[in-house]
Image (cartoon, rainbow, N blue to C red):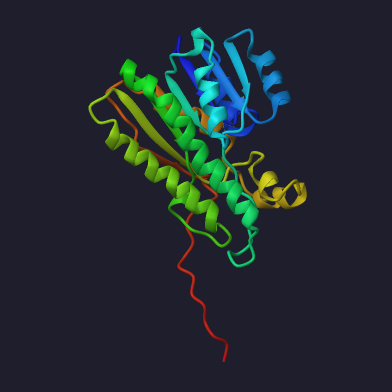
Amino acid sequence: MSGKTIFITGASAGFGAACARMFASGGNRLILTARRIDPLLKLQEELAADAEVHIIPLDVRDREAVQGAVDGLPERFRSIDILVNNAGLALGLEPAHQADPDDWDTMVDTNIKGVMYCTRFVLPGMVARNRGHIINISSTASDWPYPGGNVYGGTKAFVTQFSRNLRCDLLGTRVRVSCIQPGMAETEFSKVRFKGNEEKAAGVYQGTEPLTAEDIAETVRWITSQPPHVNVNTLELMSIDQAWGPFAIHREQK
């Protein structure tokens, strides 16, 4: 893939940064966004020899800011070929009756509204050019529940269903939509979920070989490199050390 313009949200670390490094070749132009500016500046410097990089400090929860970021792109970056909706997070692992409603709001605003806003303001250009590819990063949590996954799983179920409905809306165009559902992957994800508790975050991956950010970037590479008439609708992947559990049954002790 060469000469493409790629817009990546949540590019400061994890899947987003790995995708940026993967796409930084062949004369591609990268638009990298995240709330944290310092990691974006370092990534821009790292990739400057291989790609044109435009960075934008952006909170995808802010609809006006997202629209302003897209509308204000330099001319060379306006024709976006690939949008990677990666920005997202999980907060807390408490059961629903003990969870912090502020955490719920943050997950809904980031994981749902962020994907909506970025898609809404990038998509018209893709439709007008009759080409483009939207990659939405969902999760195995969108289909497979687990204790404490309540709102996080619900937000990722939205991402999966939103992706499917986009395909319906875009039928008759050459704009593709793909949804990736990663399982357990070792990035900053658990550190964010547990609000900086590194010991607790490390325990999630103890004794396993989880997916890596590079595994997801390679998946994005494969999906976007398919012939233009091929649309990969949904792709779920897990570490070999992860699988589905049996049905849970509560038994009264007598």
> Dividing the picture into quarters, in which one does residue 74 lie?
top right
Residue 235 higher or lower than 65, as above or below:
below
Quarter of the rendering occupied by the C terminus: bottom right
Which residue is outermost to the front?
A: 64
Does residue 226 appear in the picture of this structure?
yes
Q: Residue at x 50, y 7 (%)?
A: 76
Does residue 27 appear in the picture of this structure?
no
Quarter of the rendering occupied by the N terminus: top left
Instruction: Please state if 174 lies on the left or on the right of 158 as rendered.
Output: left
Instruction: Please state if 251 lies on the left or on the right of 56 as rendered.
Output: left
Q: Name the residue nearer the viewer: 218 or 98.
A: 98
Q: Residue at x 59, y 50 (%)?
A: 105
Residue 203 higher or lower than 82, as above or below:
below
Which residue is outermost to the left?
A: 172
Residue 132, image x, y percentages: 37, 21
Residue 23 higher or lower than 197, as above or below:
above
Residue 219 higher or lower than 81, as above or below:
below
Q: Name the residue nearer the viewer: 46 or 33.
A: 33
Q: Residue at x 62, y 57 (%)?
A: 101
Residue 127, image x, y percentages: 33, 22
Q: Residue at x 41, y 24 (%)?
A: 224
> Dividing the picture into quarters, in which one does residue 43 lie?
top right
**How many labels were placed on the picture?**
0
Residue 55, image x, y percentages: 62, 19
Q: Name the residue nearer the viewer: 130 or 43.
A: 130
Residue 63, image x, y percentages: 53, 33
